[in-house]
Amino acid sequence: MHKEMQKNGFSKTIQSKSQTYILPNGEYNYLSTNESIDEILSKVKNITKITKLKSSILITESSKRVWTNLEKEEDYLDFTSETEDF
């Protein structure tokens, strides 16, 4: 699923002014200036058909975001490089 989402422009990260953070499992970031949320929903539904995974989908539109306790991308990359045997 993650590969298909990434191929279609979805990201597992979110960017602040100076840092990149990893989103929680099952959450994706998608930036679009010309697609409606209905079009994005349709895109995600098509991705789930390709992967044949049962999915619950929630599409939101926002102008501002706040977060706390998200893992920094470099911390995540350090962790995954140590655990590639999984």
Image (cartoon, helix red, strand yellow):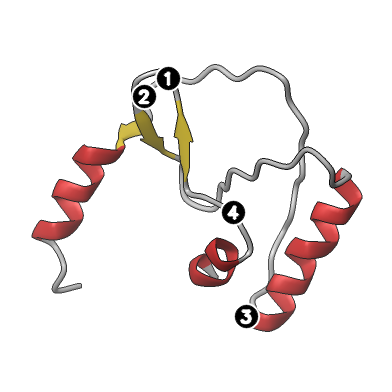
Q: Residues within 10 Å of mark 1 (few under 14, many from 20)?
A: few
For badge 1, the amino acid type reads: Thr
Choose top left, top right, bottom left or bottom right for residue 57: bottom right
Q: Nearer the viewer, residue 27 or 12?
A: 12
Cα distance in 3D space between marks 4 and 1: 21 Å
Point out residue 71 in the picture as x, y percentages from the top left corner. 31, 34
**Residue tagged by mark 4?**
10
SS of the residue under disc 2: loop
Instruction: Work out whether residue 52 can be spotted.
Output: no
In the image: residue 66, left or right of residue 13 = right
Q: Which of the image's four quarters has the N terminus?
A: bottom right
For badge 3, the amino acid type reads: Thr
SS of the residue under disc 4: loop
Q: Nearer the viewer, residue 20 or 75?
A: 20
Of callouts 1 and 3, which one flags the residue occurring earlier in the amino acid sequence? Answer: 3
Q: Does residue 5 sit above or below 34 in this rendering?
A: below
Point out residue 2 in the picture as x, y percentages from the top left corner. 50, 65
**Residue tagged by mark 3?**
51
**Residue tagged by mark 1?**
68
Q: Residue at x 14, y 47 (%)?
A: 78
Instruction: Work out whether residue 5 can be spotted.
Output: yes
**Residue tagged by mark 2?**
69
Q: Residue at x 74, y 62 (%)?
A: 44
Q: Residues within 10 Å of mark 2 (few under 14, many from 20)?
A: few
Q: Residue at x 56, y 67 (%)?
A: 7
Cα distance in 3D space between marks 1 and 3: 31 Å
Cα distance in 3D space between marks 3 and 2: 30 Å
Q: Nearer the viewer, residue 17 or 45?
A: 17
